[in-house]
Image (cartoon, coloured by chain):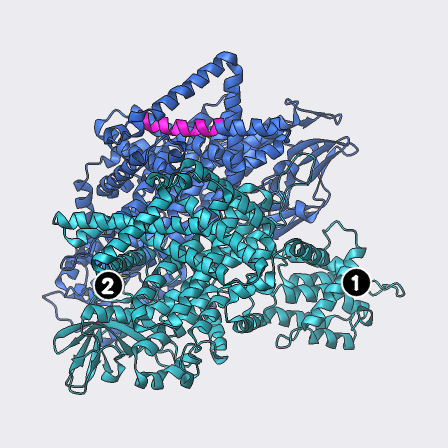
Chain colours: A cyan, B blue
């Protein structure tokens, strides 16, 4: 349909309709209001009214073709207007209604007032979108010009990032494009929770929640696909991500991984399709990270063949439990399992907490966690149990069972090993959470970089103001973080791959890996979103530009699924364990090998030529970079090992010895994770067969590697394994790489593949 | 009144009344509901009803004596109960109603249900407060025990921090204690704005807004007092702080400092008492930091003797303007003043934007900035002017005037100097904002440290779990930041003193100082609140524990009143200017003096013995510490000076040369601010006459100084002016100081003097 085919009256309303739909401000009540207004306009004929009302049908919104037509007609009219940029939508509508052959007697003051009242009814219109109409064409041209000025193969790079789940990502993005997923600020937690619940239902109905479940229960047995969905939802709304993760990852995962066939048959299908919303009730008020010391008891009563779940104190209440405050019907409750007077340690037991009508079960007390810093779309709550009885069936019995005679048995003899095996179920969450956080960081970087490529501020006196992206300090803020987003993406994919192809023996290493990457990636997320917010100044502070929610919602990622500082200590212990094994298993030979390996590294590093080698080629040599990372990890390990041994020799109990070395151990964990990330980046480059892509990846990897060395230069200089001349040279190369990546910045964030609609921030419109 | 004098029926209700008032959950509607319920209770006699209703009077809440009585009776009864800690308030009430001599026939199931329905009507009761009743006594004893185990003179230290405004702080705290100032989560911005408006009115009525105004206009001409109020309000609600600052500091300040007597007489009194809420309309959408290039025009029209204020483009709208979206009636509009076709640069003009009834003025267009990341109690908006005419009188004419003949004149010839003089009005805001931010950081530290002194997690197998404050990593997170809170407090007081006693010649230096301290202090605030949130784990994420609002509200402090990165460049230029002057003014002699001074510093630092001197006494020597700070500042200045000279010699335009050195210049600015802060800390120690206090201050100063050197150890090692052995020794001393200050941590935050009621976070209850 060409614009000429509309009557002038209809044409005058097009800008308002366009904005109404584009800005996603039309709620049901606004739609009704506008329908009423249109019905009452006596200056529109009946046929036109029907056409206009057909454009207002919320279940059948205007097609994207129609949208595009509107844009083109509006642009054509906007070009005819005086370009001072301050026209209202009504002004544009009047311009569009101008038909040379007709007179405009219908356009009375009353009609203009009616148009204005309609503009008011549509509500707040963001300025950027307004100017967006007027300059849409210009902007698209600018975007294409920027992209074509870069040599980056955006699609190719996106494929490298998307690993094997390109199709599933596209499907999720398509779903998120549904008007039902429009982002709006819902400040009230009750309303927000209902919104998120609807979203989770919709995803469940389409089978996205059960992807990691076995096929007989509606799944595809594909953890990688599940992780890809989780990651993609992270671009949209993190309350949705967390609610989704609670239901399918934690609650579903506990039944899947800790339960046996009988539980799977009874529950998994209903969990996957959201008929049975549930909770993962592990954390207690008094025992956040120290799950092993939780106070809740589950006592087997042979008289009735039941298990009695009980919270003996206020502090033993299960705390921060997602799905608890409003929607959960059942919970996997982690409790000390007591059989015949003997405590067998923490096990999970299924307990009904609410019926389908929402009535809380007898003996269960639930309290709302109320407003949180973020994630207010998730109904976190506290749960206490007062001697709640459940059948023996409800014990998730994969790693510990009670038979019909009331006798406890476990395939894992040692209690501590059993405990850590059960905790292995947390690996799924630790794999997924950092991916959603990384999505939020990538979206933030995309918004900040796009803005920095439009925003001008200050400059040389007689010239146009400078793009803020051209300030070295701005490049320093954004570019190393951009490189690290790539680095973390590869490392997290590696983790998922390791998990998907795991054997029993791998689990310990995978747990260490998951704990370390979860911590480093979520700290990175907090830091990156903050830096991006600040880099966008006042604009970054407006809720519409997304940082507000990304920041608030992801802030807890450094705490939940394991507090980062606690996890990093586990990492250090895991790494030291391997290190000890390395020495012990090889006996004397291993010792010598290790020593000589270390000797070699030392030689390499302490070698006079290399300490003072400031040559750019040398600094960009992956051999030098990896050596520097490995050397840091190894040296910190050896020195903490020596300190520990010294303390223990002096008769200091091992707990105290570890405590004294705590900050040193945390350093070991950081060095370990950094090294893993670099290795995976280098492996990715190695595997890449396209020379141009390889070059792009190498540039990003150099920035990641050298920036990390620069950050730790204090340590390297202190050790004497880098000279001041060399660290200065590294700084110069990092500066240079920031400038180089700046030239491709638009393309490098474009390769994250976040659709504009999902990005949503007005300041990011290109 | 002793508990025995109450009837059992009244006694049974005391816990509910106590919680109702303590938890501040009683809004007018709840009060009405409860009054109705009580009136309908047929098991209470008329006299008791009157007593109970008198306790429900919102304009006359129970006295603190009565409160204390309640607490004591409840504690006595609680002690008699089975101490499993899971009793409800109703259970406690029933216990309290037990009188040995009486039978309890009145206590039927119906009465108990009535009590339960009342408990429900009172609403959500926080767990902490609940347990607080039961263990109040214990906790007070614990607090006293902790305080008395520390040798810190809390009151003495508080006096050092409070400078000369102890009384005014106490008064503000008393006002904040009024039930009207109870903190509650108001999620809806319109309601929140009205709440904050009421608060500002109340403070204005009591004369707190006008403190910095001359006495004839209701003030006390006391900038220090105004700053102290601003700082104290920062413990409460930062939306209140910002609205207060917009009205009295920015809007009032513009009339006071840029206007002349005629404006003062006409407006200051009404501004101070909030009869005339107004805006400071400086920032534009397109020109955030670059005020000098703002687009709004103010054109003098000699025909009518008026000034025409106009926004020529969309991007010239005044943006983020506080008081604009809802309450402001007038605005100081910064615009290019054009007289007789000549642009005289940016001047401020008063423009009416709304009448008293809230109707927006003709030719003015206002848009709401909508939801922001935080500060949603402030009505930020955007303003455009369409050829708005105001009388010539409205030009704030202290630094530039138009006479009756239409001729422009200014006491400051040079346009750029005139501009920067006018911008000097911003110094007030730059002095106050970091103080409010520091208050938020101090409150956060207090909450996190108190929590860490109660919260236990993990530990040696057979022992009680450890206090998280005893983990070295936790000490490392909180203690250096605690020391820096003291350091910044002294530096900000110094800044206010310098401003209060300024002469014309001081202004440039004060501006540099204000820009630098504002930036460093607000970055510190963002970082510290974040670290405290994480240090409190999941509890830190709950809105009730305050970090949510502190974080969100203070986040913009790094951007407004001048973006920190932009300000730090001004600082660098200011410092380099002084440095050049130092050389130039002294001529050759100055040059030699400077060179020899530098030579001496180099000698001192490069001296073999000192480079390797790892002796604790040496590291704690203020001479060494200050030398290290001065050396860093000087060396960075000299080297950037050399680089700039080199570029300029090579024919690179000075703008480009500065751009190339941008990150280096930012380092200079940081080093300058760090040195100022240390100097002020040392001066404070020097001035302290009490030996015990002196020792406390020295301990904190050592931690600040050595931690700062440690943070910059990469630079020192790169320069070769500290050896690896010495930086390692510094690390050990910092660890030791963290442990030392940990022992006094409770007392050190107690000295901030934040009343418990103002702290408000349940996890901080001691």
| In magenta stretch: residue B625 | yes
**Quadrant of the frame with the N terminus of chain A:** bottom right
- State the image coordinates of residue B576 (x, y, percent, origin top left): 52, 26
Q: Earlier in the sequence, mark 2 or mark 1?
A: 1
Q: Can residue B457 be seen by looking at this rendering?
A: no
The residue that appears at 24% across and 74% down in the rendered structure is: A347
Q: Main secondary structure of the magenta part?
A: helix
Query: Regarding mark 2 in the picture, which secondary structure is present there?
Result: helix
In the image, taking residue B245 as reference, residue B302 lies left or right, namely right
**On what subunit does the disc labeled 2 rest?**
A
| In magenta stretch: residue B597 | no
In the image, taking residue A656 as reference, residue A545 lies left or right, namely right
**Quadrant of the frame with the C terminus of chain A:** bottom right
Q: Quadrant of residue A68?
A: bottom right
In the image, taking residue A422 as reference, residue A167 lies left or right, namely right
Q: Is residue A151 above or below residue B570?
A: below
Q: Quadrant of residue A399?
A: bottom left
State whether discs 2 and 1 lie on one chain: yes
User: Residue under circle 2?
Assistant: A315
Instruction: Read off the magenta span.
Output: B623-638
Residue extending farthest to the top is: B589
User: Residue under circle 1?
Assistant: A96
Q: Can residue B586 be seen by looking at this rendering?
A: yes
| Disc ID at residue A752 | none
Query: Regarding mark 1 in the picture, which secondary structure is present there?
Result: helix
- State the image coordinates of residue B333 (x, y, percent, origin top left): 63, 39
Mark 2: few/some/many CA within 10 Å (<14, 14-19, 20+):
many
**On what subunit does the disc labeled 1 rest?**
A
Q: Is residue A629 above or below residue A753?
A: above
The residue that appears at 57% across and 36% down in the rendered structure is: B660
- State the image coordinates of residue A503 (x, y, percent, origin top left): 33, 73
């Amino acid at each position: 349909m060409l614009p000429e085919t509309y009557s002038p009256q209809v044409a005058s309303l097009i800008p308002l309709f366009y904005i109404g739909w584009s800005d996603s401000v039309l709620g049901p009540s606004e739609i009704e209001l506008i329908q009423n207004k249109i019905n009452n306009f006596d200056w529109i004929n009946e046929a036109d009214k029907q056409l206009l009302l057909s454009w207002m049908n919320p279940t059948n919104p205007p097609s994207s073709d129609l949208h595009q037509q509107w844009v083109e007609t509006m642009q054509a009219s906007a070009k005819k207007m005086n370009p001072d940029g301050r026209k209202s939508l009504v002004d544009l509508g009047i311009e569009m209604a101008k038909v040379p052959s007709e007179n405009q007697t219908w356009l009375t003051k009353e009609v203009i007032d009616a148009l204005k009242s309609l503009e008011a009814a549509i509500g707040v219109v963001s300025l950027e979108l307004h100017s967006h109409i007027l300059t849409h064409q210009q902007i698209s041209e600018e975007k294409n010009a920027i992209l074509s000025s870069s040599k980056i193969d955006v699609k190719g790079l996106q494929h490298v990032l998307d690993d094997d789940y390109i199709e599933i990502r596209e499907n999720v993005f398509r779903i998120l494009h549904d008007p039902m997923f429009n982002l709006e600020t819902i400040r009230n937690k009750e309303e927000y929770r209902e919104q998120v619940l609807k979203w989770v239902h919709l995803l469940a109905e389409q089978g996205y929640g059960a992807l990691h479940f076995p096929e007989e229960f509606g799944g595809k047995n594909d953890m990688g696909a599940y992780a890809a969905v989780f990651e993609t939802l992270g671009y949209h709304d993190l309350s949705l991500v967390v609610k989704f993760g609670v239901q399918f990852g934690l609650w579903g995962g506990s039944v899947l991984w800790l339960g046996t066939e009988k539980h799977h048959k009874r529950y998994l299908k209903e969990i996957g399709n959201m008929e049975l919303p549930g909770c993962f009730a592990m954390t207690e008020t008094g025992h956040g990270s120290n799950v092993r010391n939780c106070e809740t008891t589950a006592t087997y009563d042979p008289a009735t063949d039941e298990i009695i779940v009980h919270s003996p104190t206020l502090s033993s209440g299960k705390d921060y439990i997602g799905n608890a405050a409003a929607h959960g019907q059942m919970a996997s409750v982690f409790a000390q399992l007591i059989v015949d007077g003997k405590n067998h340690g923490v096990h999970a037991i299924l307990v009904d907490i609410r019926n389908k009508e929402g009535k809380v079960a007898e003996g269960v007390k639930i309290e709302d966690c109320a407003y949180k810093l973020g994630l207010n779309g998730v109904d976190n709550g506290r749960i206490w149990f007062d001697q709640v009885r459940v059948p023996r069936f409800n014990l998730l019995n994969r790693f510990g069972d009670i038979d019909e005679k009331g006798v406890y048995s476990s395939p894992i003899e040692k209690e501590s090993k059993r405990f850590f095996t059960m905790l292995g179920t947390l690996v799924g969450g630790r794999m997924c959470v950092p991916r959603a956080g990384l999505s939020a960081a990538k979206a933030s970087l995309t918004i900040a970089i796009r803005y920095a490529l439009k925003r001008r501020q200050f400059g040389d006196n007689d010239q146009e103001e400078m793009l803020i992206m051209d300030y070295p300090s701005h490049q320093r803020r954004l570019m190393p973080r951009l490189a690290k987003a790539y680095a973390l993406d590869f490392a997290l994919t590696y983790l998922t791959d390791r998990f998907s192809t795991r054997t029993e023996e791998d689990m310990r290493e995978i747990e260490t890996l998951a704990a370390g990457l979860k911590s480093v990636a979520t700290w990175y997320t907090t830091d990156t979103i903050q830096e991006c917010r600040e880099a966008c100044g006042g604009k970054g502070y407006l809720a519409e530009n997304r940082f507000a929610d990304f920041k608030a919602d992801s802030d807890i990622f450094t705490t939940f699924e394991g507090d980062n500082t606690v996890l990093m200590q586990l990492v250090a212990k895991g790494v030291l364990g391997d290190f000890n094994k390395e020495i012990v298993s090889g006996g004397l030979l291993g010792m010598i090998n290790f020593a000589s390996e270390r000797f070699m590294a030392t030689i390499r590093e302490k070698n006079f030529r290399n300490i003072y080698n400031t040559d750019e080629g040398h600094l960009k040599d992956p051999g030098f970079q990896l050596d520097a990372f490995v050397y840091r990890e190894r040296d910190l390990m050896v020195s903490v090992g020596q300190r520990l041994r010294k303390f223990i020799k002096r008769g200091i109990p091992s707990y105290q010895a570890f405590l004294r070395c705590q900050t040193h151990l945390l350093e070991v964990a950081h060095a370990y994770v950094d090294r893993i990330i670099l290795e995976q980046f280098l492996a990715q480059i190695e595997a890449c067969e396209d020379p141009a892509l390889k070059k792009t990846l190498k540039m990003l990897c150099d920035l990641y590697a050298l920036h990390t060395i620069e950050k730790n230069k204090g340590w390297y200089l202190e050790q004497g394994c880098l000279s001041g001349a060399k660290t200065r040279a590294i700084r110069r190369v990092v500066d240079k790489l920031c400038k180089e990546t700046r030239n491709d910045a638009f393309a490098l964030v474009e390769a994250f593949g976040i659709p504009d609609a999902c990005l949503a921030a007005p300041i990011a419109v290109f």
